[in-house]
Amino acid sequence: LLIAYRVPDAAPQPVVGFREGWGEPEQNGERPERWLAQAGQLSLVVPVAGRYRLSWSALPADRSRTLEIGLGDQTFAVPLTPGTRRYALLLDLPAGMSRLELRSREPATTGDALEHNGDLRPISVRFADIALEEL
């Protein structure tokens, strides 16, 4: 049995992909979240070169942290304050794939150190709702 149909044309959209340094997705209510260890990578794939807004919600583990974000020869320092907050960064991206390097300046901790729950994974920042949009 085969069902075939025409898929409507749609404009290509920016895509964010997780690479190294991330925990498995965890469900917190309706939205998935992932912990960044000490450092990790994201892939950003865009259909055309231009200015894009990368936005995300973040909860730093244990205390305020500084998130360093590297894109090529540029490095951005984003201060993260306690509690879950929304952050955004404007990026000039070439068409195709770019790789972001993310790193917490402060050492990672563990769930066990914070809540004595037996979770020994290194964690520094919990991310959710990562979005990339063309401006």
Image (spheres, rainbow, N blue to C red):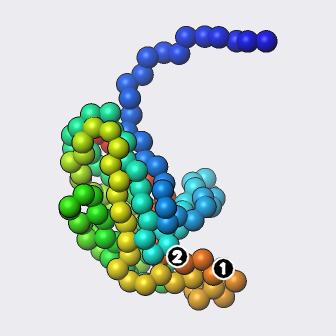
SS under mark 2: strand
Residue 113 in view in this figure: yes
SS under mark 1: loop
The amino acid marked with disc number 2 is Ile
Q: Circle 1 is placed at which residue position?
A: 119
In the displayed structure, does residue 96 sit left or right of residue 122? Answer: left
Q: Are marks 1 and 2 in contact (CB under 8 Å)?
A: yes
Looking at the rendered structure, the number of numbered marks drawn on it comes to 2
Q: Is residue 8 above or below residue 70?
A: above
- The percent coordinates of residue 134 (x first, y second) are 28, 39
In the displayed structure, does residue 34 sit left or right of residue 77? Answer: right
Between the residue at mark 1 and the residue at mark 2, the CA separation in whole angstroms equals 10 Å
The circle drawn on residue 123 is: 2
Name the residue at 61% across, 61% down: 24
- The percent coordinates of residue 128 (x first, y second) are 49, 58
Residue 135 in view in this figure: no
